[in-house]
Image (cartoon, grey):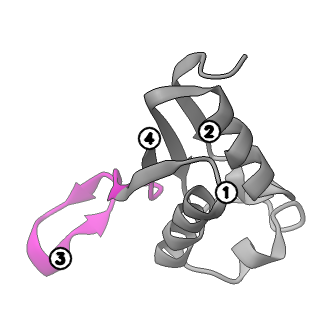
Amino acid sequence: ENDSFDVVMCQLSIDYLIHPLEVMKEVARVLKPGGKVAILISNLLFLTKAVGLWTGSDDIEHAYTVGSYLHYCGGGLGDIKAEDLSTRKKSGKERMIVGDPLYVITATKS
């Protein structure tokens, strides 16, 4: 049904989508107005299964790519933000990631 979910999540799989704009448009269709989408990404993937656009990019480019999917899907998603959720040790320039990096890109349906 249209406008039926408050939140939609896509965890560690957007890098495998062949038609990400269509999927994000469907996400927007089922979100209620004011609903949120959260897409979690890491730099871990199966190289033989991920789409080519993803395999030659770094973490920042991945966040921009996902943000572009949300922006250009035509589903009325806005207020797009990316956040680094990675666990880090130390502070300042020495903030090394502990374990695997983790990022979330969010948007809100207007």
Tell me the CA gap for discs 1 and 4. Answer: 13 Å
Q: Looking at the picture, how far across and down is residue 8, in whole percent?
A: 56, 30
Which numbered marker is on residue 28? 2
Q: Residues within 10 Å of mark 1 (few under 14, many from 20)?
A: some
N-term-proximal mark, 3 vs 4: 3
Mark 2 surroundings within 10 Å by alpha-carbon count, few (fewer than 14), some (14 through 19), many (20 or more): many
Span colored in magenta: 83-103
Report if residue 88 lies within the magenta region: yes
**Which amino acid type is marked by label 3?**
Glu
Which type of secondary structure does the marked residue at label 3 adopt? helix
Q: Which residue is mark 4?
A: 110
92 shown above or below 98:
below
Q: Secondary structure at mark 1?
A: loop
Q: CA distance from mark 4 to mark 2?
A: 9 Å
Is 50 located above or below residue 102 in the figure? below
Please give left or right for residue 33 compared with residue 95 in the image. Answer: right
Q: Which badge, 1 or 3, comes first in the chain's sequence?
A: 1
Q: Nearer the viewer, residue 14 or 71?
A: 71
109 sits to left or right of 18? left
Q: Which labelled disc corresponds to residue 30?
A: none
Alpha carbons under labels 1 and 3: distance apart? 38 Å
CB of mark 2 within 8 Å of CB of mark 1? Answer: yes
Q: Mark 1 sits on what residue?
A: 73
Q: Which mark sits nearer the N-terminus, 2 or 1?
A: 2
Amino acid on which disc 1 is placed? Cys
Q: Name the element at disc 2.
A: helix
Judging from the image, what secondary structure is the residue with disc 4 in?
Answer: loop
Q: Which residue is mark 3?
A: 94
Of callouts 4 and 2, the N-terminal one: 2
